[in-house]
Amino acid sequence: MLLERDELTSGSTWHAAGLLPLFNMGYATSHIHDYSVKFYKTLEDETGLNAGFYVVGNLRMAQTQARMDEYMLYASTAETVGIPYEWLTPDEIKARWPLVRTEDLKGAIYHPTDGYINPADVTMAMAKGARQRGVVIERKWQVDGYAWAGDHWDVTCTKMVEKGGNLVPSDETVVDAGRARGHRDRQPCAAHRADAGDQDARDPGRASVYRDRTRPRAGRVAQVERRAPGPARCRRQVVRARGTRRLDPRPLRTGRARAVRIRRARQFPRRSLPARPRTDRGGIHVDDPPHSVFGDGGSEGRFQRPDLLHARWQPAGRARAGAQEHVAGRRAFPSGSPPPAARDTTSRR
Amino acid sequence: MMVDGEAEIDMASLDPKRYGPWMTTEYAARKNEECYSHVFILHHPDEEREACRPLRTGPAYDRQKALGAQFGQVNGWERPNYYGPKDAPETFRPRRAILSARRLVAICQGRGRGHPHRRRPDRRDGLHQAPRARAGGHRVSRSLHLQQAAQGGAHQPDLRADEPRHDAHGIHHRALGENEYYLVSAGAWTAYDADFLMKSAEDMGSGGGWVDIHDVTTQWGVFAIAGPKSRDVLREIVKDADPDTVLGNKRFPWLSMREIELGMCPVRAIRVAYTGELGWELHHPIEMQAYLWDQLMAAGEKHGMKLVGARAQNWLRQEKSYRAFGTELGRDATPLEAGLDRFVDLDKEFHGKAKMVETGVRFKCVTVLIDGPEDADPWGREGLFADGQKVGRLTSGGYSVAFGKQIGMGYVAPEHAEVGRKLKVRMFRELWDAEVVEDSPYDPTNAAIRVDG
């Protein structure tokens, strides 16, 4: 099972250039690169998805002898791993790539098996291949922690929801014990019950802890179980949160377009958009941007677990201060200025 | 498989455990930024990067710096790489200091990790089982050291505190008491070894007894003093009823540990030297390091003592064919391939034995002397060739002052491993002559190490 906090490719993949250079000074790293290139070549056969892999070769040019010496170090590592390379003189560089000005070049190292790949496509192809082999990919689950419990892993996760265009943690938390699909006879784990009890005392919205005796493996499916319900209002909130449609009318984009959007979102934060009238939204405001929880006036009935959510958005000290201000009926945050944590999640769209 | 807790290839150089609990967010962020700014710069072999330094320093740091120490960062610690001018020409090689180490006496600073490792008396084989429980076939080469520690403890019931227990490479270990051990790990791999120890202790479960493991890395510093005159230097400051004999072979044999007093500093002295000379590792309470440094420097002055750093140590140990973890030793080679046969008792059962025997000997660890280029030494990434075919690779490289040529250690196919075999090593696009030499080409009988006095 693979747990993904957001959507696949929403992490570092979206800004990866997708270059596959095989030169390296490290023996282990070179092996990994070598393996990757060979693996990508088999990916389309296995999954039917083209990962956008183009083996075009890679020309590293040197203007100084020191650079050439450096390339020779790369070459020695490549040689021990079995990665092919060639040395090119400036004339040979010109022959291979006529557009380059070679007068001030000492030479180049050429790796014929280098190439580039589309990072998003290769991710999706790998995801498909994994699914074909029985892996389940669960999205919108943030892994908060994991611990080896002797014979299995306990993985603590939080369901992520979209609120007001931000990906935020809900208060739905499970501890998954890497169960095989279909097992219903889970037992609370004695070793963890005390912890869970503590947690529940502090935070009644948290899940109970379960365990089983199987070790998580590719192909095993974790049973993601709704946590024990908290207060009724809280549960409603979760249900609503899961049903929330995307509030952003702009089409969902991936890859570079997505990067552009995120950049734009940073330039023109959502807080500059006019707030919609409060009356439109009914009683439960799961789609509120987090900073409006204590925000612009009229807060009664808006947020049932301020202690919980607030703790997520702010360091503890500020949370207390905010709560006091909330009681006093003042703005916890200057309008238009979300707390720092909320800013972080903005960029996680 | 990764999901079973092990990678298929040697990932030690990328293992998160090469850091320790001293790591902070700020450190990670600044080092990360440094990586980005370094992407396109020219990378030198063994480069030392500047971000977040100095961070972990011993009390003698300022004294060393004043004497020209050029530091490298190992696991966050500042450790002298060599003593000399920073703007030294490219041809600079600290060979004079090395000659001192061979001919006179030299001191360098290491930083090991001690694990006083206690066992309960009713659990004689506790330490013995700890590594066995954990040492999957993948990691036999590493665990073997612990294995040795364990076997030493388990099969010699009348263990005395000063009795030598030594594995020659990697983790040294010494018995402090009947059920107490002091393990010395490499400075770069403390978290790695600690992880192994802790998990091994955990895996023992409730099988009886307990193992108490303490990380005393930040409580004990280490200076290594080595060279033919090191005994004379120590004799100047050692406090003993009979200072003339306390360091002699009878009272302080090779590979043994003793508690001695140097001036007012209590020292756990271990008679080993990674450089292959008469020498001691001086494990001292870290708060007395500056005092001990001053004592040693004063005592060494009239004996012509020189300071050397880790680079010199790395070259010298190759002349003795001492394997190092992270280069020769790792998960890619079994103990038999690494030439640690004398530490492997195939008559006994141990975890990983079947896998090791099944793997066989795919390649052998060899030491080679190289007639390389004038202005460069191998650094342990080069390919080894015979008859135009690649037959192996170097894992360490350097310059041997004793032989006046480049030296390296590496792995080659077994048929090319015999002594005297002529090989080629590729450096800077050219093939250079190399010859396989016997293990420990310098002082193969260890006469210099065992010398009495």
Image (cartoon, rainbow, N blue to C red):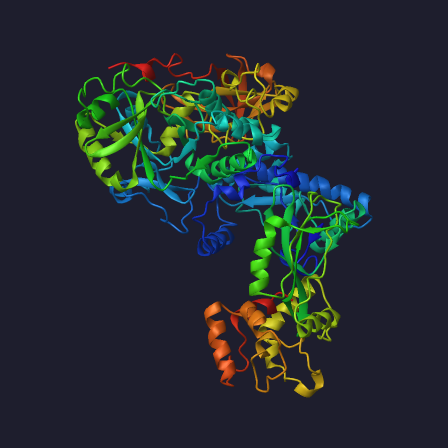
Location of residue B152 with respect to B110 vertically, above or below: above
In the picture, measured across the screen, residue A309 lies left or right of residue B238, that is right
In the picture, measured across the screen, residue B177 lies left or right of residue A16, that is left
Number of numbered labels in the structure image: 0
Percent coordinates x, y for residue B183 in the rendering? 41, 31
Of the pair A66 and B296, the residue shown nearer to us? B296
Q: Can residue A277 be spotted in the picture?
A: no
Percent coordinates x, y for residue B259 in the rendering? 28, 27
- Which residue is located at x 52 percent, y 86 percent? A329
Percent coordinates x, y for residue A289 in the rendering? 62, 76
- Which residue is located at x 59 percent, y 81 percent? A272
Of the pair B305 and B9, the residue shown nearer to us? B9
Q: Can residue A37 be spotted in the picture?
A: yes
Figure quadrant of the N terminus of chain B: top right
Figure quadrant of the C terminus of chain B: top left
Q: Splitting the image into 4 quarters, where does residue B336 fall?
A: top right
In the picture, measured across the screen, residue B236 lies left or right of residue B208, that is left
Of the pair A9 and B312, the residue shown nearer to us? A9
Q: Splitting the image into 4 quarters, where does residue B304 fall?
A: top left
Percent coordinates x, y for residue A305 in the rendering? 60, 73
